[in-house]
Image: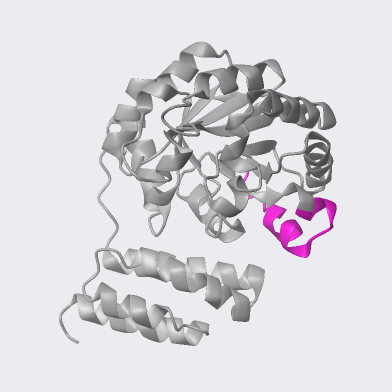
């Protein structure tokens, strides 16, 4: 598919998950087949105040491209300025967050709260798309709640104000991440607009990916929590949708090897001191399905050095062969 002049190869994209989709994870998922990635959301006000944290969130490597920088806020002029500043980091796309359900975001009028004001959504898209010469996209939800399902309305307004693609998460804000996901609303958006539509929400296997693609008619599939501790999901989906190939799941050894390389990359980008703090949750995600996972997750929560990680990995693998 194409988002204006940006070509995306394959069927899958990595979602902009706060606290997870950092530079190291985006690169890793790209290596495993993700055709497109989006940064963690960055505060437009943080960018305007020259926040160092905001700057770090926008950094990317050539490995992880095409990549979008996702920004959030509720003031059109501030969002436009943030988008202009973000261009210094050479993103392929600017994505606008209109879907985050977190109270600290939506409670301040940003994220999914924007869907309560479709006119403002349009004003923000227009301001941002007028400020930059790269594609501007939007990520929305089904609506604020079941009494205000307006994804189609918001998508059409965003398109008419310059949006080059729309990602739809098939839940309302009040649902957060609770089931069920409404894939029919994504199909309705796809029929209502002439720009690419990306489906998001509970795509956790190649089989589900195929069903969502067929049910929605969407142009791309965005994987979020299904990729945590499981970057192989992109390889599996790409193979299955390309020619029906079913790839065997990774062995325990491969999981541990990839996990270690992932954590080493986090430490390379963020230093060992801060990287190992980030690593703890990733290790916990990778441990799903392992023997003794609960005990090892508890130990992972105390990791502070790469040598401690090496020792933990050795004991995890040993436990899988019942030698411990």
Q: Is residue 41 magenta?
A: no
In the rendered structure, the answer to whether residue 98 lies left or right of residue 179 reads: right
Bounds of the magenta segment: 46-65
How are the residues colored? one colour
Give residue 281's quadrant in the image.
Answer: bottom left
Quarter that holds the N terminus: top right
Q: Where is residue 233 in the image (x, y as percent from the top left)?
A: 37, 47
Residue at left 71%, top 52%? 58
Is there any visible trace of residue 5 in the rendered image? no
Name above or below for residue 215 compared with residue 295.
above
Does residue 193 appear anywhere in the picture? Answer: yes
- Residue appearing at x 64%, y 28% in the figure: 117
Decide which of 308, 187 is in the foreground and name it. Answer: 187
Instruction: Check if residue 56 falls in the magenta segment.
Output: yes
Looking at the rendering, which quadrant does residue 286 occupy?
bottom left
Point 35% across, 45% down: residue: 178
Q: Residue at x 28, y 80 (%)?
A: 295
Q: Is residue 300 above or below residue 167?
A: below
Q: Residue 252's spot in the image, x, y percent? A: 28, 67
Q: In this view, does 80 lie to the left or right of 196?
A: right
């Amino acid at each position: 598919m194409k988002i204006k002049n940006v070509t995306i190869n394959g069927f899958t994209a990595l979602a902009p998950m706060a606290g997870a989709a950092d530079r190291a994870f985006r690169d890793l998922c790209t290596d495993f087949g993700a055709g497109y990635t989006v940064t963690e959301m960055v505060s437009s006000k943080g960018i305007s105040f020259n926040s160092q944290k905001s700057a770090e969130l926008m950094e990317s490597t050539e490995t992880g491209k095409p990549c979008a920088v996702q920004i959030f806020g509720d003031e059109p002029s501030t969002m436009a300025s943030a988008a202009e500043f973000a261009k210094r980091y050479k993103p392929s796309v600017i994505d606008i967050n209109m879907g985050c359900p977190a109270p600290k975001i939506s409670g301040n009028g940003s994220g999914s709260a924007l869907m309560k004001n479709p006119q403002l959504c349009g004003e923000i898209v227009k301001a941002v798309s007028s400020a930059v010469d790269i594609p501007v996209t939007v990520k929305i939800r089904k609506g604020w709640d079941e009494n205000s399902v307006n994804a189609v309305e918001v998508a059409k307004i965003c398109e008419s104000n310059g949006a080059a693609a729309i990602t739809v998460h098939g839940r309302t804000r009040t649902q957060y991440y609770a089931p069920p996901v409404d894939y029919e609303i994504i199909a309705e958006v796809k029929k209502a607009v002439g720009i690419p539509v990306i489906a998001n929400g509970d795509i956790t296997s190649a089989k589900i990916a195929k069903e969502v693609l067929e049910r929605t008619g969407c142009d791309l599939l965005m994987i979020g929590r299904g990729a945590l501790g499981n970057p192989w999901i992109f390889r599996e989906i790409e193979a299955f949708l390309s020619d029906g190939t079913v790839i065997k799941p990774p062995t325990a050894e491969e999981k541990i090897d990839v996990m270690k390389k992932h954590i080493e990359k986090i430490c390379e980008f963020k230093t060992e001191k801060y990287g190992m703090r980030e690593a703890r949750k990733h290790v916990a995600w990778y441990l799903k399905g392992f023997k003794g996972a609960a005990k090892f997750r508890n130990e992972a929560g105390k990791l502070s050095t790469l040598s401690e990680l090496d020792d933990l990995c050795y004991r995890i693998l040993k436990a899988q062969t019942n030698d411990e």
